[in-house]
Image (cartoon, rainbow, N blue to C red):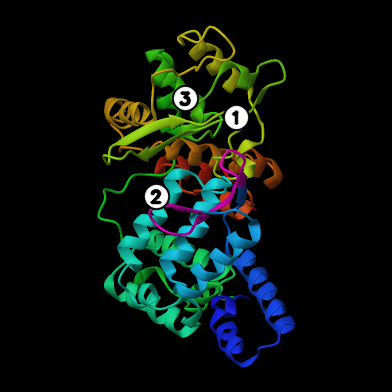
Amino acid sequence: MLNKLNLKGYQNIDKLMQSEIVLVALEEAMKKDIKKLHKSKIWYDEKRGLYQTLLPVVPKKIISAKSEDKLMNKLIDFYSSKNISFEMIMSEQLTEKLHTRSIVKSTYDRYYMDYRRYVKGSVLDKTDVDQINSAIIKKFLNDKIAEGISRKNFNNLVSLLNIVYYYSEATDMNVKDIAKRMNLTSKQFITSNRRKTKSVWTIKEQKAFKDYCLKANNLRCLGLLFAMNTGLRIGELTALKPKDIDIENQRLQIRRIEYKEKDENGKTVYHISKDEDERAKTSASLEPIFLSNEAIKVYKLLLAHSTAKRPNDFIFDGLKTYHFDHTLRRKICADLNISPRGLHSLRKTYATELIDHNVSKTIVKSQMRHTSFDTTERYYHKNKYEAEDTLNILNSVSIG
């Protein structure tokens, strides 16, 4: 593992050892360490005749040199004179993940928000990464628990710390393991002040929802019904084109997603990624899924209301995620007189139905496009039945 590139060690040795052969070897070793730490690619600008790379600083900065060796020397100067701070490693790692499309822009923004909220100005922020040990990490996490943090925000924070202390190779500390050994209980976390919404629709609610959407017979309602019948993320739904659906073979291919980000004025703007853009949450997100007969039926109904006339047209052209959220929460749930539901409740309901109908774990994971079934199981909710339904089920069971 890299230990601040061992650059301080190199600098001390440089004063003691004057042999040219030794110095060349040390320089090569330093370059090797630099290449491990420096995640940004090095490219050649033919027009300018310069080798270039991006420094892990905010705002972004490009450095140039006439040869790759000279560029490496500039990188050595940069890293040897600069403390290996949390923010520097975080910036480099997140920039690389965004560039390689390992994360989407909204996830990138969330990590930065978590940094400003929990880490900035703390001991982790003020201390070089290679000087941090597991005891310091544990105390930091315990302090956040004492200050009050929700389970979700705590897990997000742990993921951020792991990006810096584990995946960057700056140290070998797995923060997730440290957090796991803390044996935290749910009582130690605060609950969100936001109004609780049910995650999964009951059997009766599902029927009422279906009847409502079919009766409304408009693009928004039928789109939401299609989402419940496929488990699509809403950002995947809004980016669909007719060419993505193979009716004959009952397949749907995710090729792009809608995502949002902040512009230079802080305003939220929505974009749709290019086809086959790896902005999808995981590689599994790009895998095709099967469409049930019911899903095909709903798709044909909604397509009749769409302005899409060609295979490459957007089915929900002009509709964004927030349009569907408004329709679901403020229109459908209000009209049905049920508690407000978020868009993700449709996806969770779909997963729960698959599991309850004894669909194999492999198929469920594939349909949900999760990388592991553990993620899928977190979507499962056993309490989808109303008390009356539960009693009827129990009464139907004959024992003895």
Q: Which residue is rendered at x = 49% and y = 17% of the image?
A: 315
Q: Is residue 268 left or right of residue 305?
A: left
Task: Give the x, y percent position of residue 196.
Answer: 30, 49
Q: Amino acid at mark 1?
A: Arg
The image shows residue 218, relative to residue 7, as above or below, that is above
The image shows residue 185, relative to residue 192, as above or below, that is below
Please rate how many residues cluster around mark 2, counting C-alpha atoms within 10 Å: few if below 14, some from 14 to 19, many from 20.
Answer: some
- Callout 2–callout 3 Cβ contact below 8 Å: no
Please provide the residue range marked out in magenta.
44-63
Q: Which residue is rendered at x = 45% and y = 42% of the image?
A: 385
Q: Quadrant of residue 251?
A: top right
Q: Quadrant of residue 153?
A: bottom left
Q: What residue is shown with label 3?
A: 225
User: How far separated are the C-alphas under marks 2 and 1?
Assistant: 23 Å
Q: Earlier in the sequence, mark 3 or mark 1?
A: 3
Q: What residue is shown with label 1?
A: 255
Q: What residue is shown with label 2?
A: 109
Task: Give the x, y percent position of residue 360.
Answer: 70, 44
Q: Is residue 58 magenta?
A: yes
Task: Give the x, y percent position of residue 344.
Answer: 44, 39
User: How far separated are the C-alphas under marks 3 and 1?
Assistant: 21 Å
Q: Earlier in the sequence, mark 2 or mark 3?
A: 2
